Image (tube, rainbow, N blue to C red):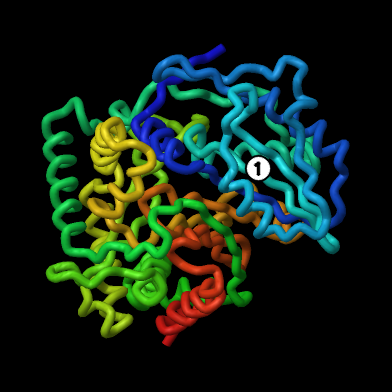
Amino acid sequence: MAWSTLNVFQRLARQWDAAHPYNAAQVLKISGDPDLSALHATWHDTLHALGLGRVRLDGRSFCYESLNGQTHLYGIRAVPPGVSFEDCISEELNRRFDNPAEPPFRPFVLPADGFHYLGVVYHHWVADSVSIRTVLREWFLRLFDPAKARRSPLTLPDFGYRRFFDLIHQASGLAHGVLTAARWGAGLRQVRRIQYRCGTDLSVRFVVRAAPPGLIDTLHQAARRHNATLNDLFMAAIARVSSRYVPLKNRPHRHGLAVGSIVDLRPYSDTDIADAFGLFLGFTNVFCRAQDFRDPHLLLRSIARQNTLQKRGGVPQASALRMLIGTIVGRLVPPHRMAHFYQKHCPMAAGISNVNLNRSWAADYHPAPLLDYIRVSPTGPMMPMVFATTTLGRSFHVALTYRPSVVPPHRIDALSREFLDALAQYLD
């Protein structure tokens, strides 16, 4: 039994989980009808082969334990036909993992007309998107291509962010981290805070909206013309809809808007952690000035410039220091005050998690039998909504997790349309 140490983001995520369930989900949309007995058997075989099960915590260390023949207690939830996919995910995002004997993974299947959703809702502190994609890959392979299934356990890291990013134990790294944190704090003092409609209710809902087929190709072309990335385009569109649909306070000296981005830190590691099962994420954000919104191209140039400078300056890695500060604050701020604290000191209007799956295993089985791959991100106490944009093949969709206490559900359809309209303005 291998033990691993909670890294700084895992400790922070567990603090956020005390304020509201910090759950995420990933879902396969598969053609045909599900075979429930095969799903159950392959799911438990996947957990056993990968060395996953319930989690045992001992201070800041944890390990995975076998279910010891209790697999029948924690099988696959068969969602009744007729339940909407969005309602199913919304319910699970708000449901706590409060049983220590339960694994931090809740598999489910939802039949539909000619296809079915097969997914996992997971306790986000245990794993990032890359790790869960591995779990779903192994489950999928056992169903559709068993000869390629993995039979060896996953690696649990026995190190934290310090070893990866040389941030704390070298004076130069520490100085850089302090400088970027100071700049980040100065920028946040110039952006507008959220005007909450229902206090700090952290309950969330989920929707998913598909973009028109082929739009992703023209967006890539547009990004190149503007010397930007696809993620820059997405962030510009998110900033524009956030300024319109997120209720923000107008205060003297606070006229800007902040949008965050979730970054996979694995490529920045000085050791190979591609196969490590865990949570290795960082954050960046852009500050949008009031004058930037007068011209969508000016807004895009500002966002692209900031993102380029942050990549060059190691800001994603340096976000580990901000997480460390967050864990210290989390010991002092009670869970019911956490959202208020973040809104006051870290007012983010929205966030994005953007992934291109065309370089992953999913592309090998798309468009049949894998119709689509849907990722669902949590908001946490920091953001009122998070856009999970996912590209597979020549299509992409937007999975939006949002707080109804901030953005009412009746405005989500209009928000989604305007997001796509904002992207279309960069196609000229």
Q: In the image, is residue 74 above or below residue 129?
A: above
Q: Residue at x 28, y 57 (%)?
A: 347
The residue closer to the viewer here, 137 or 238, is: 238
Q: Is residue 229 visible?
A: no
Picture quarter with the N terminus: top right
The residue closer to the viewer here, 367 or 162, is: 162
Q: In the image, is residue 6 above or below residue 133?
A: above
Pointer 1 residue: 120
- 207 vs 28, left or right, is left
The residue closer to the viewer here, 94 or 123, is: 94
Residue 116 appears at what percent x and percent y? Answer: 79, 55
Q: In the image, is residue 345 above or below residue 399?
A: above
Q: Amino acid at mark 1?
A: Val
- 186 vs 249, left or right, is left
Residue 185 appears at what percent x and percent y? Answer: 17, 51
Residue 133 appears at what percent x and percent y? Answer: 59, 43
Residue 274 appears at what percent x and percent y? Answer: 48, 35
Q: Residue at x 52, y 44 (%)?
A: 129
Q: Residue at x 69, y 36 (%)?
A: 138
Q: How many marks?
A: 1
- 68 vs 286, left or right, is right
Picture quarter with the C terminus: bottom left
Q: In the image, is residue 340 above or below residue 290?
A: above
Q: Residue at x 42, y 48 (%)?
A: 380
Q: Is residue 338 visible?
A: yes
Crowd rating for badge 1 (residues with CA inside 10 Å; few <14, some 14–19, many 20+): many
